[in-house]
Amino acid sequence: MAMSGGKDDGSPMMDMNTTPLIDVMLVLLIMFIITIPVATHSVSVNLPVSTPPPPTTEVHPDKNKLVLTSQNIILWNGTPVTYGNLVALLKATKAMPVEPELQFQPEAYANYEVANQIIKIISDSKSTKFGFVGNENYATFTKAP
């Protein structure tokens, strides 16, 4: 037998079999690697807590507010308008020397399809000063411990 060790005459092998020893050492090495705690380099920093800005009640002449209510009513600065009126109002604001800012604020339970149609109308009007407002009403603010 070629695998039996020294001689082919059947005499016992005199060398120590180190394969089980190596297997045990590898298992112990893996166990030590797993149990070593992960070295984390963290620095504790107390960050300031942001608070939502108070709602403003003042009206700016250079801003138009477009609100979509939960009943699918489109309000332009508080006045109900239709899709056709909205297109005309957007064309009129685009023709002004200084384009006023357009703020779009859908209410919490407003219809998504109607909001999507309004955004498409605004996009088609090529309005350059357009933004969403009121998102801070849905944000959750937590205090740091």
Image (tube, grey):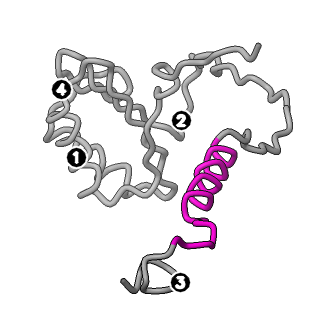
| Figure check: 88 above or below 94 | above
Secondary structure at badge 2 equals loop
| Figure check: 69 above or below 103 | above
Q: In front of the other: label 2 or label 3?
A: 3
Secondary structure at badge 4 equals loop
Q: Position of residue 30 (x, y in %)?
A: 61, 51
Mark 1: amino acid:
Ala
Q: In front of the other: label 3 or label 1?
A: 3
Q: Which mark is residue 111?
A: 4
Determine which residue is flagged by label 2.
61
Q: Position of residue 32 (x, y in %)?
A: 69, 45
How far apart, in angstroms, are the residues tagged by discs 2 and 1?
18 Å
Where does the N terminus fall, quadrant-wise?
bottom left
Determine which residue is flagged by label 1.
88
Taking the spot 32% from the left edge, 27% from the top edge, the residue there is 106
| Quadrant position of residue 66 | top left
Q: Which residues make up the magenta segment?
A: 12-34
Secondary structure at badge 3 equals loop
Secondary structure at badge 1 equals helix
Q: Is residue 47 magenta?
A: no
